[in-house]
Image: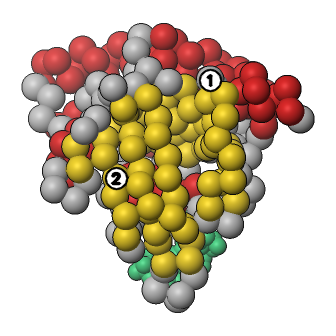
């Protein structure tokens, strides 16, 4: 089963900048996949399109067999995203950030409460559940975004530079948690500009630069070639 299929995807922004050029990408269900590339390569644009935040200029995206053009709702329901920037909902208490997201996806309230508690405990945020999001540290906000991304049990989780700017201890804890989610069968795609992170976590990776996929490989092969 294919989790994500991207075919000849193009994006030209309003100012004429061509951020993606004929991008082709396939990610199999259950994979842990890294999208590696320098700043400005087009990673966030690609994720923005897959998660309906950015309009594509051309091409096709399918998520678990649902075509983004015809079944955007089904695509969204299958994806949990941890964005790079999260300055929304800052005045909401932690627990409400998670419950709101569950509500958005139609998770029944009781079920949502149980899942929220489980996730917040796991991510070491349960004691902060009544704290407004704006009062959390950067690392805590990131963990909250992970809880929020998982509460509707998406089959594909996309993390955009999940460990940028967090210290090594939190980074390792987040790696452990991501591995655990993946071991449970959830497909994970993460963007990073750290090769070390891709190497430590992922089975497959693609390298993107200047809006084009430059290489796609499994980690072992790539490392052998370096
Ligand atoms: P679109 O042009 O596809 O509607 P947006 O609405 O997201 O794109 O952005 C509007 C404008 O803001 C862009 O055309 C561009 O001039 C500017 N802009 C926003 N983000 C960036 C960025 N990261 N780099 C360069 N320009 C940007
Ligand atoms: P990455 O996530 O790999 O750093 P991005 O997808 O953010 O790359 O950006 C790819 C290119 O598109 C960059 O040149 C960036 O400046 C440009 N860009 C991003 N968003 C916009 C926008 N809204 N309008 C115009 N250009 C943009």
Vertical position of residue 207 compared to residue 196: above or below? below
Task: Measuring from the top left, give residue 99's x and y in whole percent.
Answer: 25, 33
Of 50 and 144, nearer the camera is 50
Q: Which residue is depicted at the point 36% across and 32% down?
A: 2
Q: Secondary structure at mark 2?
A: strand
Task: Measuring from the top left, give residue 119's x and y in whole percent.
Answer: 39, 19
Of label 2 and label 1, which has the lower sequence position?
2
Task: Measuring from the top left, give residue 86's x and y in whole percent.
Answer: 48, 52
- The residue carrying mark 2 is 61
Q: Where's the C terminus, which quadrant?
A: top right
Q: Is residue 15 left or right of residue 28?
A: right
Q: Which residue is depicted at the point 48% across and 80% down?
A: 13
Q: Which residue is depicted at the point 22% across and 59% down?
A: 69
What residue occupies the far right of the structure in this picture? 226
* Label 2 Cα neighbours within 10 Å, binned few <14 / some 14-19 / many ≥20: many
* Label 1 Cα neighbours within 10 Å, binned few <14 / some 14-19 / many ≥20: some
Question: Residue 138's image quarter?
Answer: top right
- The residue carrying mark 1 is 203
Q: Secondary structure at mark 1?
A: loop
Q: CA distance from mark 2 to mark 1?
A: 22 Å
């Amino acid at each position: 089963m294919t989790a994500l299929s991207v075919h000849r995807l193009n994006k030209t922004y309003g100012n004429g900048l061509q951020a993606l050029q004929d991008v082709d990408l396939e990610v199999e269900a259950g994979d842990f996949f890294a999208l590696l590339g320098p700043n400005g390569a087009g990673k966030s644009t690609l994720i923005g399109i897959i998660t309906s935040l950015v309009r594509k200029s051309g091409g096709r995206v399918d998520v678990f067999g649902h075509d983004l053009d015809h079944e955007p709702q089904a695509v969204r329901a299958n994806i949990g995203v941890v964005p790079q920037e999260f300055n929304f909902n800052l005045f909401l208490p932690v627990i409400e950030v998670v419950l709101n997201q569950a509500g958005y996806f139609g998770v029944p309230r009781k079920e949502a409460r149980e899942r929220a508690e489980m996730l917040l405990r796991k991510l070491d945020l349960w004691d902060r559940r009544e704290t407004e999001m704006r009062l959390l540290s950067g690392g805590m906000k990131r963990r909250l975004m992970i809880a929020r991304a998982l509460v509707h049990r998406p089959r594909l989780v996309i993390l955009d530079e999940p460990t940028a700017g967090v210290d090594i201890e939190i980074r390792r804890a987040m790696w452990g948690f991501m591995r655990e989610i993946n071991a449970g069968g959830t497909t994970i795609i993460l963007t990073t500009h750290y090769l070390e992170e891709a190497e430590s976590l992922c089975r497959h990776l693609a390298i993107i630069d200047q809006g084009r996929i430059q290489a796609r490989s499994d980690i072992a092969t790539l490392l052998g070639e370096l």
